[in-house]
Image (cartoon, helix red, strand yellow):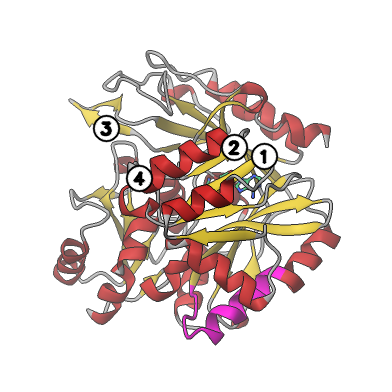
Amino acid sequence: MKLMVIGGGGREHAIIRKLKENPAVTEIFALPGNGGIAADATCVPIGAKDIAGAVDFARREEIDFAVVAPDDPLVLGMVDALEEAGVPCFGPRADAAVIEGSKAFSKNLMKKYGIPTAACEIFDDMDAALAYVRTQTPPIVVKADGLALGKGVVIAETVAEAENAVRAMMGEHIFGESGSRVVIEEYLTGPEVTVLSFTDGKTLVPMVASMDHKRALDGDRGLNTGGMGVIAPNPYYTPEIARQCMETIFLPTMHAMNAEGRPFRGCLYFGLMLTPHGPRVIEYNCRFGDPETQAVLPLLESDLLTVMQAVRNGRLDEIDVRFSDAASCCVIVASGGYPAKYEKGFPITGLEQVSGACVSVAGAALQDGRLVTSGGRVLGVTAVADTLREAVALAYKNVEQIRFEGCFWRHDIGKRALEA
Ligand code: AMP
Ligand code: GLY
């Protein structure tokens, strides 16, 4: 079978590595992939948002199955276009990907179907938003409606800061069109949990729950990033909470999307907060999380391609999706300065010393046969072990082997989980 995976980050590398375990897979193309993915797939210089390019390529190469991993092409309708061209795909169609593409859509969905989330108001008018903010007690959560590279959320400690966020999004359009509508919501507290799930719209199978570490620096300080490390399973996510989430959040969301005529097939991502009043949805994503996928997929014992095909064909109920009881830890190694300004082009050394762990490459390119940095999050090192403590130790032992100029990582991935 010839497969095609859209995207070029650590998540895509983890997906490709898992897909390769199936002996029926003869070739995997990554569009566009990256310098590290090139070791596991054939990289093709077609951008992840290039729908016409992907359709052309899939036809030309007679691709048997495609995985569209990133949010942008999903929201733009790449799955619709590929399916119409006769290429079976894993991933939601655009009408379902809107669950991530518009926060106003997802908040209204939750309101309409009684799915627990932070109370909120939605604004298209800046003056109305500003007036509302002035009636609120901080912290005030201000979110851009559309996709904003994970940067569209401001937790304002003062009313003035919230006003500035509204002006920046709605007046100065710092996130472009994504911010012409804003969501202002209640501030929630509690441990955060990510639950990725496979769903074909009829059956929903949650994967092992994980914990992302979003801030750039140790002790949850510094700027928000795309994620600096992940552990799984998440110790806060007890069987009782899992049961509650299935009953009040996961299945109701699947049914709500069906009732709206937007059946969701793919990986539905639940970003949850376990508040003192119960689990609440912080966000939905229409795709695998990154870096969560780098920690969660290594625990999957079932064949990923079989699961993805079952999701695509509406037959998820017919297969067994198994995860191991082991624990995993993924530590992201980033470029100095990330998530703000950073330099690129530094050679990466030490990858051959890595042992007992796997490396998913996110931001690196091949230059004269050498791997050099090309992004903020450069790579993720994932280790799996019987206990979380061992997984964390093994991941860090391997991170220590890897070097490039200015590299940095958090030293406390899994610390909070181990203390929990
Ligand atoms: P999001 O992009 O919606 O996942 O938000 C990014 C991060 O902001 C989340 O992971 C939370 O840590 C935080 N956050 C978002 N919404 C809220 C909220 N209503 N209350 C408290 N923290 C929030
Ligand atoms: N790690 C957060 C995300 O994938 O959105």
Apparent side of residue 157 relative to residue 90 in the rendered image (left or right):
right
Marks 2,1: beta carbons within 8 A? yes
Residue 321 in sight:
no
Q: How dense is the environment of label 1, judged by Cα within 10 Å: few (below 14), some, or many (20 and up)?
A: some
Q: Amino acid at mark 1?
A: Pro
The local secondary structure at tag 3 comes to strand
Q: How dense is the environment of label 4, judged by Cα within 10 Å: few (below 14), some, or many (20 and up)?
A: some
- C-alpha separation, residue under disc 4 versus residue under disc 3: 37 Å
Is most of the magenta stretch helix, strand or loop?
helix
Query: Residue 322: image x %, image y %?
Result: 66, 64
Highlighted magenta segment, given as a residue range: 249-265
The residue beneath circle 4 is 171
Q: How dense is the environment of label 2, judged by Cα within 10 Å: few (below 14), some, or many (20 and up)?
A: some
Query: Residue at 55% across / 34% down in the picture?
Result: 160
- C-alpha separation, residue under disc 3 versus residue under disc 2: 43 Å
Of the residues tagged 4 and 3, which is closer to the observer?
4
Q: Amino acid at mark 4?
A: Gly
**Ligand 1 neighbours mark 4 (CB distance < 8 Å):** no
Q: In what quadrant of the picture does the C terminus appear?
A: top right
Query: Residue at 34% across / 76% down in the picture?
Result: 88
Residue 345 lies, with reference to residue 207, above or below; the image says above
Q: Amino acid at mark 3?
A: Ala
- Label 2 vs 1, first from the N-terminus: 1
Marks 3,2: beta carbons within 8 A? no
The residue beneath circle 2 is 159
Q: Amino acid at mark 2?
A: Val
- Label 2 vs 4, first from the N-terminus: 2
The residue beneath circle 3 is 365
Marks 3,1: beta carbons within 8 A? no
Residue 166 in sight:
yes
Query: Residue at 17% across / 25% down in the picture?
Result: 368
